[in-house]
Amino acid sequence: MPKFSITALGSATHDITGPEQALAVALTHKINNKTKPLGALGRLESLAQQVGLVQGTLTPILSRPVMMVFAGDHGIVEAGVSPYPQAVTQQMVLNFLAGGAGINVFAKQNNMEVRVIDAGVNHQFAVHHDLIDAKVGMGTRNFLVEPAMTEAQCEQALTRGARMAQHEISLGSNVLGFGEMGIGNTSSASALMAVLCHLPVEQCVGRGTGLDDAGLQKKISLITQALQHHKLSGTDPTEVLATFGGFEIAMMVGAMLGAAEQKAVLLIDGFIATSALLVAARLQPAVLDYCVFAHCSDESGHRLLLQQLGAQPLLDLGLRLGEGTGAALVYPLLQAAVGFLNGMASFESANVSRQGEN
């Protein structure tokens, strides 16, 4: 893995514009002129169109795909929102580094590189050549009683995330996937969704890592209390992120913005990654043009969150693992879209008659 060092901090600002639309007509013509009935490749056609527009070419290529997995701990766990102990976060980071997690398997299957990033795990890891130490703090504070992070910490996480994404792009990557690990982070994601989308907490909260009915009701009650305590309007996405987010979520927000600014394709995983994108999109709406939504997870609230973003996920497999697993699984569909656009014959080149021709 290439080395990456965290340099001096500064405010992360981004100016993201949507892809240039000048090629849209030419891309549509190229897709429609393939040896197939119009629209016969369904979602692969719109995916090919999107990648072509993002890259600004009729012959896009996918280069050095990277899965960025951000890890962080959450102070809200002390209130009892998860059936798992906080130590699982650090244990899973070690599992990632050992190559034993789901994301390792799926990334290897698809020749994707995995970056494991300590954004704010409540553990001091030994130096490891496959671990990026970007730690902002030893986990966030309990947002039930105080903001999860300070404004400075939030800015720090955003900046570090953007720099990491841009570093990967400078090394030749043009496809970045986003995954996470953090016990308690579905609580953060639910709170972000409720405030930024102005939705009832009950519609945003799910069972996370496996809460029973009583645990689910407790989680809903605690997040409701937290929202009432802070009384945020939701008009300032960075304030909402600092109040309810996790270090790994904030760093993902920064990485998404940094990647979109460099015109990479973003593979968005499940509920947590989509909540990070929600914040990113409230800050820079054009980031959505660069996003491929991998799947609709089985976590309650994700389908509604996707609808809020106007997103159409490619898969619906009942996944709720996180880690970027859904984003890794969808990468072959991205390859297929680019593959048919570049390799499939046209009616003229194959000497095949079109519909209605004699």
Image: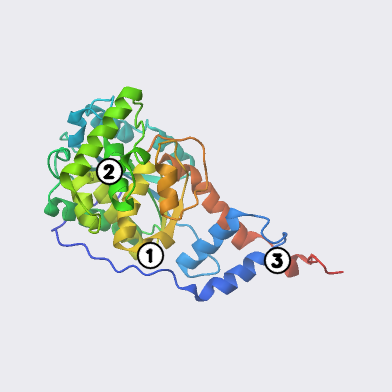
Question: Dot 1: what SS?
Answer: helix
Residue reaching furthest right?
358
Question: Residue under circle 3?
Answer: 346
Looking at the rendered image, the disc whose residue lies closer to the viewer, 3 or 1, is 1
Q: Is residue 287 above or below residue 69?
A: below
Residue 349 pos. (x, y %): 73, 68
- Report whether residue 312 is seen: yes
Question: Dot 3: what SS?
Answer: loop
Say what amino acid the circle numbered 3 marks: Ser
Q: Is residue 343 above or below residue 294?
A: below
Identify the residue at horizontal 63%, vertical 60% (top origin). 343
Identify the residue at horizontal 31%, vertical 46% (top origin). 194
Q: Residues within 10 Å of mark 3 (few under 14, many from 20)?
A: some
* N-term-proximal mark, 2 vs 3: 2
Question: Dot 2: what SS?
Answer: helix
Question: Residue under circle 2?
Answer: 191
Say what amino acid the circle numbered 2 marks: Ala
Looking at the rendered image, the disc whose residue lies closer to the viewer, 2 or 3, is 2
Closer to us: 314 or 66: 314
Question: Residue under circle 1?
Answer: 286
Q: Quadrant of residue 54?
A: bottom left
Q: Is mark 2 in CB contact (under 8 Å) with mark 3?
A: no
Q: Is residue 62 above or below residue 114?
A: below
Closer to us: 161 or 355: 355
Q: Could you give the CA–CA distance between mark 2 and mark 3, rounded to whole angstroms?
A: 50 Å
* N-term-proximal mark, 3 vs 1: 1
Q: Which mark is residue 223?
A: none
